[in-house]
Amino acid sequence: MATLEITQTGHPSLRSTARVVSEHEIAAPSTQRLVDDMVETMRAASGVGLAGPQVDMNLRLFVAEAHPTERRPNIAELELLVVFNPLITVLDSTWETDWEGCLSIDHGAMMGQVKRFQRIRIEGLDRYSQPLIRELASFHARIVQHETDHLDGILFFDRIYERLAPHEQAVLTTRENFERFFSNSSDKAELVIAEDGSGT
Ligand code: NI
């Protein structure tokens, strides 16, 4: 296994539409190696998700995983997900606003408050081309929406601006200013996921 270079904002791969992966391709040793390398890369970067375009692969594929840590004790455990050709169905379109970072935006150092659907169903294929169906809510639903967006060339700050209510101001901050201006706010419980390793 190897860690891969994570593409950064401005790289064309992050703005292109990734292509569907056939079952034949999923079974190929090169694709299986790519999955292993993406998992290793995500873990090495302390991320909770990584999509094909983030390693310059134009494939509809993402990996995701989350564990509670000392710094982020409130994270609900998400066992490793490897999903090819994901399709999202929104089950609850209520917005949930929370902090996100992205390993492709200044290596996770920019953070923003992003509105995501509260509950979704994801359908796709796992690494053995078996059908995979999960219903996810809150933080887990957020990760999957963020990763699936990567497959369509969408970055989290696009969603911030697209989903702003009239007269609402975008919240986008460097990590330094997050610590300085936002970390003492009253909704600190929500901010826990914004600590190191929240990049996706
Ligand atoms: Ni990302």
Image: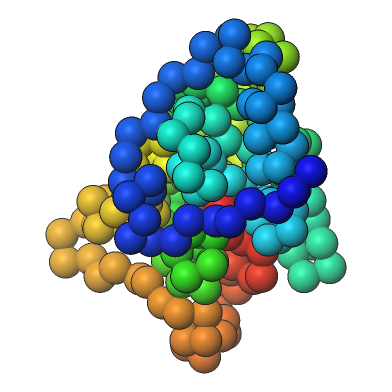
Q: Which color mode does the image show?
A: rainbow
Residue 39's place in the image compared with 99, above or below, is above
The residue depicted at 74 percent of the width and 37 percent of the height is 36
Q: Which residue lies furthest to the right in this view?
A: 70
Q: Depth check: give the residue in front, 80 or 16.
A: 16
Does residue 90 appear to the left or right of 35 in the view shown? left
**Residue shown at the point (32%, 50%) measured from the top left:** 12
Where, by quadrant of the figure, is residue 39 drawn?
Answer: top right
Q: In which quarter of the image is the N terminus?
A: top right
- Above or below — where is 180 with respect to 108? below
- Residue 93: tell me if it is visible: no
Q: Which of 35 and 89 is in front in this view?
A: 35
Q: Is residue 131 above or below residue 97?
A: above
Please give left or right for residue 45 compared with residue 12 in the image.
right
The residue drawn where x is 50% and y is 18% is 21
User: Total marks drawn?
Assistant: 0
Q: Residue 121, image x and y in percent?
A: 53, 23
In this orientation, does residue 60 appear?
A: yes
**Closer to us: 169 or 124:** 124
| Residue that sits furthest to the bottom in the current view | 180
The structure residue drawn at horizontal position 38% and vertical position 46%, both measured from the top left corner, is: 13
Location of residue 80 in the rendering, given as x and y in whole percent from the top left corner: 75, 36
Check the image and name the residue furthest to the left: 166
Q: Position of residue 44 (x, y in %)?
A: 74, 58
**Location of residue 19 (image quadrant):** top left
x and y, in percent, of residue 2 in the image? 74, 48
